Amino acid sequence: MEQSKYFFYPNPHDFYAWTKCPKCDEKTKLRKFCLLIHYKDESFRSPRLLSVRMDCKFCTSCELIIKKKSEIEVALQKMVANWNLKFDPKNYFVFGTMEMNDWKQGQKASTPPQNALENVSVFKDVLDFEIQPAGWYFSGDK
């Protein structure tokens, strides 16, 4: 496995796009990442390792990748539908990234999981942020 590079925030809010980084308040950029997803279902003998190439919000100074959970789940639903299974959002977690060149090679030929894991960069941490909607708030008790 490669050294951990990034932090990850699976954004559970469909209405908040994070144009600014929630950690440092700098503007986020749009960047393609190959996200690695661990998917487990009762019908599998062993869990599946899935790689999905997606556009994500990215803060270069914090090395924070932000992706909406709903968009990840839509991509997973399509994959799971191909296996004639019912998708369950509790059966997956995103755990790292893969370099784009390694991902492209894996798309051309089937790669054993042991070889695929050699090229994985596991997230440093998966973060969660609290959102305070815009509006007027009292600064203290009166």
Image (cartoon, grey):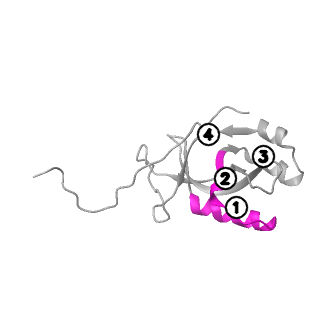
Report, in whole angstroms, how far the alpha carbon at label 2 lies from the one at label 1.
Answer: 9 Å
Report, in whole angstroms, how far the alpha carbon at label 3 lies from the one at label 1.
Answer: 22 Å
Q: Which residues are magenta?
A: 69-95
- Residue nearer the viewer, 135 or 81: 81
* Residue at point 78%, 46% (across, down): 101
Amino acid type assigned to the residue bearing label 2 in the image: Tyr
Q: Specify whether 91 is left or right of 29.
A: right
The residue tagged 1 is: 76
Amino acid type assigned to the residue bearing label 3 in the image: Asn
Amino acid type assigned to the residue bearing label 4 in the image: Phe
Report x, y in % for residue 19. Answer: 46, 57
User: Mark 1 and mark 2 in contact (Cβ < 8 Å)?
Assistant: yes
Foreground label between 2 and 1: 2
The residue tagged 4 is: 123
Q: Is residue 76 magenta?
A: yes
Q: What secondary structure characterizes most of the magenta part? A: helix
* Residue at point 76%, 68% (across, down): 81
User: Mark 1 and mark 3 in contact (Cβ < 8 Å)?
Assistant: no
N-term-proximal mark, 2 vs 1: 1
N-term-proximal mark, 2 vs 3: 2
The residue tagged 2 is: 92
Q: Secondary structure at mark 2?
A: strand
* Residue at point 62%, 36% (across, down): 5
N-term-proximal mark, 4 vs 1: 1
User: Disc number at residue 49?
Assistant: none
Report x, y in % for residue 63. Answer: 54, 41
N-term-proximal mark, 2 vs 4: 2
* Residue at point 34%, 60% (across, down): 133
N-term-proximal mark, 3 vs 4: 3
The residue tagged 3 is: 101
Report x, y in % for residue 52. Answer: 71, 55
